[in-house]
Structure formats: structure tokens, C-alpha cells
Image (tube, rainbow, N blue to C red):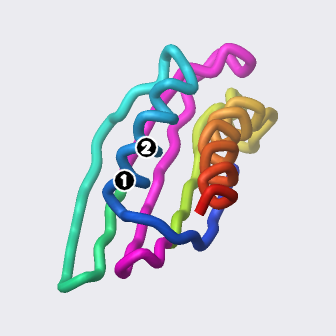
Amino acid sequence: MAKYECKLNGDFDTFLNRLDYEIKQGSISASFEDGSHFQVGNVRCAVRVYERYSVIGSNRVSMNITLFGNGNDLFLSAITSGGSQAMFFKINTWGEQSFLSTLTKFVEEFKQRS
């Protein structure tokens, strides 16, 4: 499992749409699996699940993204899972780290522009 969290500023919809695009463009096998959206007043929450094939690990990995927003104040949490071939413990997390790096690179660049 690999995890990345951060606070940032920006338009909720613009950021979420761009994030979706960057993840799917980051790997030929990346796909959007499902998502959910919830809003109470100005507070919004979007959950997205992506999956891709990891050539290095010869397996599939998933990434769960939660974006929480109140106006332009955003909080992002991304957690990857899967990728191990062992039964009782993880013997590799290369695919998880690699999948997460697609997201972190985009988010760090987005934060610099904001």
C-alpha cells in the first residue's frame, strides 16, 4: 500500500476532471472503475477508483482517490493497493508506488501553479 495526502487550493470540478485525465493518460492500461459524489451545501466529496496493470509486478493495482472540497479549499487522499503476489505478506510494492507517482507528479505541479 502507498498513500499520498495533501491540502491544495483550486476549483473542485476543474481539479477533479484534470486529475482523471492525468491518471488515465499516465498508463495505457489505466481505467476508471467507479466513483461516487456527495454534496452538502458548499462541501463536496468525490471518490474515484482506478485500476491498471503493473508490468513490473505482473499484476493489477488499484488506486482509490478521495477529494474533499469546501469552496476552493481542497483535500486529497490517494491510496493504492494490490500488486503483491505473496499470500501472507507483501513482497513488492513497485506497481503501487509507480501508479501513485502518476498522481503525485500532477498534484505537485498543480500546487506550484496555484
Residue at point 42% right, 34% down? 21
Read off the magenta span: 48-74
The residue indicated by pointer 2 is 18
**The C terminus - image quarter:** bottom right
Disc 1 and disc 2 in contact, CB within 8 angstroms: yes
Callout 1 amino acid:
Thr
| Vertical arrangement, residue 6 with respect to residue 104, above or below | below
Q: How many marks?
A: 2
Residue at point 42% right, 75% down? 72
Horizontal arrangement in the rendering, residue 18 relative to residue 105 (left or right): left
| Vertical arrangement, residue 71 with respect to residue 77, above or below | below
Q: Is residue 76 magenta?
A: no
Furthest residue toward front: 113
Residue nearest the observer in this picture, 74 or 27: 74
How many other residues sit within 10 Å of disc 2, few (<14), some (14-19) or many (≥20)?
few
Which secondary structure is most common in the magenta stretch? strand
Disc 2 is placed on an element classified as: helix
The residue indicated by pointer 1 is 14
Horizontal arrangement in the rendering, residue 23 relative to residue 102 (left or right): left
Callout 2 amino acid:
Arg
